[in-house]
Amino acid sequence: MDDNQRAQTGMHEKVNEVLTSNAVALSGVAEVAVKNGELKTQIDTTLLKAGLSKADTTGAAVQKGDVRTLLEKKILKVGTAAASHFHTIGNLTNERKVDFKKSEVEEADGNKLYGMAKLLFGIADPIKLLLVAYNSGPADVSTLNILKESFFGQIQDPKLATEEKGVYNKEADESIIKGNAICEELDIYMGNFAETEPTIYGLYLAARKQDNTGADAPAQITQELTIAPNTIVNIDISAITTPTGSNAVKLTVTGVTLLLFGFAVSPTSQPPTMASVSPGNALRRTFASLNFNAANRRFLNIVNTSGVAGNFKVEVF
């Protein structure tokens, strides 16, 4: 689990702890318990997937290495016996095919080594009884076959294990994004307790203050601007090299005009999904909740639909 994942999951856990500890007092709004249950599911999923993404995959490589060593030895033993047999009967063609040099076997890559073993087994199996005279025989040929198939099945194991780690890490990120979306819904429902349960509400806000994009990490982009009436202003987010759905944007309206923000297909178009912020307020949303798409919906636009100019501060995390 990287720092960003750890921070966001920590926020989810704190929110879950506050809501669970005060479940009775918050029972007046049934959706809080429902969403808290969904949040706990995402926390468990994140922890599981993040743990799997960091699992030690060296075992697969070690196991493959052990099988390879045994296979190399068996290729050399059976190959030497078969080469001796074919040399005795004057079959130079087959002798050359199975007379593998030690360096050749040891330096072969996985696929080539498997090819050597497959070729050798195909030639040695019909004459396995005759190899007894050369310190080998049916048992060695049978073991050669077993080892080659075992080795073939493991050639991709380390690669697959590494790929699986990447998949698990992606799934952990996806679970975090879902958790962030649930928290944003909880923000709405918990607003009902701002006056009736101020202490609990304060604890909830403190848990949420940890931020769903990396604890108290500073914003990567901060701008304070004025937006003209009926205008769209694009915010350059290129400073974030690889933006994802778990990044977030916070808009604070410092003027007297309601503003909207979201991601659009161009710097001058209106986003199809927008969040609104009224004068004197601030709102933070994850990129995912605004339907950010790195391919075709990556332009962060602030929209003023009124006939009055507005002032705002935008922060991107």
Image (tube, rainbow, N blue to C red):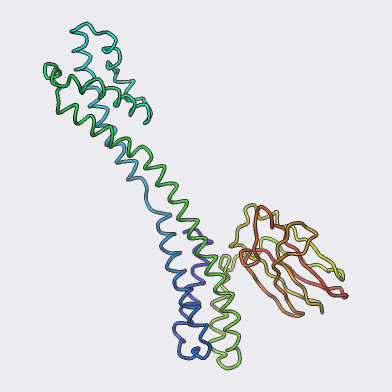
* Residue name at image x 27 percent, y 8 percent: 92
104 vs 290, nearest the viewer: 290
Q: Quadrant of residue 304?
A: bottom right
297 vs 206, nearest the viewer: 297
Q: Position of residue 164 (x, y in %)?
A: 43, 50
Number of numbered labels in the structure image: 0
Q: Quadrant of residue 85?
A: top left
| 80 to 221, vertically: above or below | above
Q: Quadrant of residue 128?
A: top left
| 309 to 89, vertically: above or below | below
Q: Position of residue 175 (x, y in %)?
A: 50, 64
Q: Quadrant of the C terminus?
A: bottom right
Q: Is residue 311 left or right of residue 293?
A: right
Q: Is residue 204 left or right of residue 239?
A: left
Q: Is residue 230 left or right of residue 266?
A: right
Q: Position of residue 15 (x, y in %)?
A: 50, 77
Q: Position of residue 217 (x, y in %)?
A: 60, 65
Q: Is residue 193 left or right of residue 256?
A: left
Farthest top residue? 90
* Residue name at image x 34 percent, y 20 percent: 104
Farthest front residue? 126
Farthest bottom residue? 196
| 67 to 259, vertically: above or below | above
59 vs 98, nearest the viewer: 98
